[in-house]
Image (tube, grey):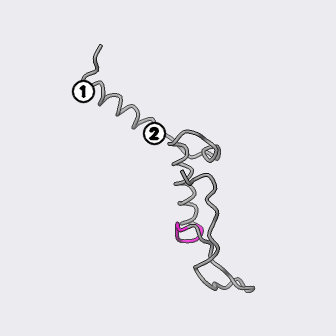
Amino acid sequence: MKKDENDYKSEAMKNALDIAGKNFTPSDYESEDPVDKAMAVTHEQASDVFTEGTSDGKIDELDENAELKTHHGKALRRRGFDN
């Protein structure tokens, strides 16, 4: 039986709702599912922004008195997210 346009729309809506209902879990970092991997990357970026105020993946450099030296700190290793 051939699918009509309504079948495709219904399937797309189901897929969208499945994805929209997902939450981050730590196992997303090791998952092979592209949606889980994207969730892990998004979680990491949100965490960086919350912690550092930026999503560039660099940690601020502080001096011995915990005063800011520079915002151009050491880049974080993004292992596993190069694909």
Query: Quick one: 23 or 7, which is closer to the camera?
Result: 7
Looking at the rendered structure, the secondary structure element under dot 2 is helix
Numbered circle sitting on residue 5: 1
Q: Main secondary structure of the magenta part?
A: loop
Query: In this rendering, is residue 71 above or below 22?
Result: below
The amino acid type found where label 2 is placed reads Ile
Whole-percent x, y for residue 19 in the image: 45, 39
**Residue 7 horizontal side relative to residue 34, left or right:** left
Q: Specify the farthest residue to the top.
A: 1
Q: Who's the residue at 29% across and 31% down the image? A: 9
Q: Magenta span has 76? A: no
Q: Quarter of the image holding residue 23?
A: top right
Question: What's drawn in magenta, residue-wise?
Answer: 51-56
**Residue 31 horizontal side relative to residue 35, left or right:** right
Q: Which residue is mark 2?
A: 19
Q: Magenta span has 53? A: yes
Query: In this rendering, is residue 20 above or below 56?
Result: above
Q: Specify the farthest residue to the left.
A: 5
Q: Who's the residue at 45% across and 35% down the image? A: 18
The amino acid type found where label 1 is placed reads Glu
Instruction: Mark 2: give few (<14), some (14-19) or many (20+) Cα within 10 Å.
Output: few
Whole-percent x, y for residue 61 in the image: 65, 79
**Residue 15 horizontal side relative to residue 50, left or right:** left
Numbered circle sitting on residue 41: none
Whole-percent x, y for residue 14 in the image: 39, 31
Query: Quick one: 54 or 34, which is closer to the camera?
Result: 34
Query: Quick one: 80 or 42, which is closer to the camera?
Result: 80
Q: Nearer the viewer, mark 1 or mark 2?
A: 1
In the rendered image, the quadrant that contains the N terminus is top left
Instruction: Mark 1: give few (<14), some (14-19) or many (20+) Cα within 10 Å.
Output: few
Q: CA distance from mark 1 to mark 2?
A: 21 Å
